[in-house]
Amino acid sequence: MSMMGELTFFLGLQVKQLKDGTFINQTKYTKDLMKKFGMEANRPDITFAVGVCARFQCAPNESHMTAAKRILRYLKGCQEVSLWYPKESGFKLIGFSDFDYDGCRVDRKSTSGTCQMLGNRLVSWFSKKQRSIATSISEAEYIAAGSYCSQVLWMRQQLRDYEIEEKEIPIMCDNTKYISTDKQLANIFTKPLCESRFEELKHELGLIELS
């Protein structure tokens, strides 16, 4: 609440506040997006796909245009999907770090993907092609984990500003010793997935239909 009333729209994000939590979506932006033909929506479920298409924006060919149109068709079919932020979820910060070794067929570089959860709330995520060519799976994993640590250290400092101290922040790397592949939430930011796995991860990240 503020002097201007309840927050309903902020920086392109539509906000719907309920008693037990808050929905954040980009329905209006998505509609404007499709109307104009652009494709950069701030949605975790298309972060990887948009990132891959963006690699070829300087010299796109027909296959890239086909992929871009497929993303737009996907957005059209799920305009009401929103990020759900429940009120009663705690403030335990936990992160997931994943990589797709040798995933780019053009230059053989790997893709890093991370996401951070504050309780059951998705608060940060990214998908990015690594700058150098990893010579082993372990090297690609360490590069991805390094990017994750930089983000987590910044987030820990932000929480301190609100007097929330996080002494131990677990890093869930894509390694069966620490977390099994089927529980790795960052999979959605590093590689194409089958429909069932994709929908499962969307739900785990808090992307649900606004009703």
Image: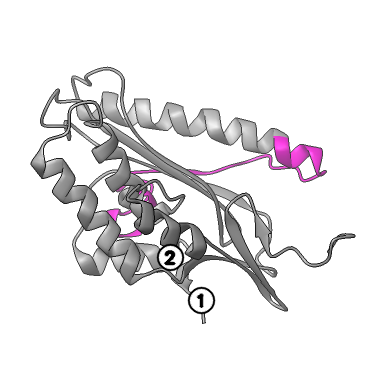
Find the magenta span and give its range.
Answer: 158-186
**Residue under numbered circle 1:** 210
Label 1 CA crowd tier, 10 Å (few <14, some 14–19, many 20+): some
Label 2 CA crowd tier, 10 Å (few <14, some 14–19, many 20+): some
Q: How far across and down, in percent of the image, does residue 98 sit?
A: 34, 41
**Whether residue 184 is visible:** no
Name the kind of residue labelled 1 in the image: Leu
Name the residue at the bottom extreme. 211
Depth check, mark 2 against mark 1: the one in front is: 1
Indicate the secondary structure of the residue bearing disc 1: loop
Looking at the image, residue 2 sits to the left or right of residue 18; the answer is right
Q: How far across and down, in percent of the image, does residue 9 sit?
A: 66, 60
Identified at 21% across, 66% down, the residue is 195
Identified at 51% across, 76% down, the residue is 210
Q: Is residue 105 above or below residue 21?
A: above
Identified at 24% across, 39% down, the residue is 53
Identified at 77% across, 46% down, the residue is 164
Q: Are marks 2 and 1 in contact (CB under 8 Å)?
A: no
**Residue under numbered circle 2:** 204
- Dividing the picture into quadrants, the one containing residue 136 is top left
Name the kind of residue labelled 2 in the image: Glu
**Whether residue 142 is visible:** yes
153 and 14: which one is in front?
Answer: 14
- Dividing the picture into quadrants, the one containing residue 65 is top left
Q: Which colour style is shown?
A: one colour
Q: Is residue 171 above or below residue 140?
A: below
* Quadrant (top left, top right, bottom left, bottom right) of the N terminus: bottom right
Q: Is residue 103 magenta?
A: no
- Dividing the picture into quadrants, the one containing residue 80 is bottom left
Q: Is residue 63 above or below residue 83?
A: above
Q: How far across and down, in percent of the image, does residue 203 sit?
A: 41, 68
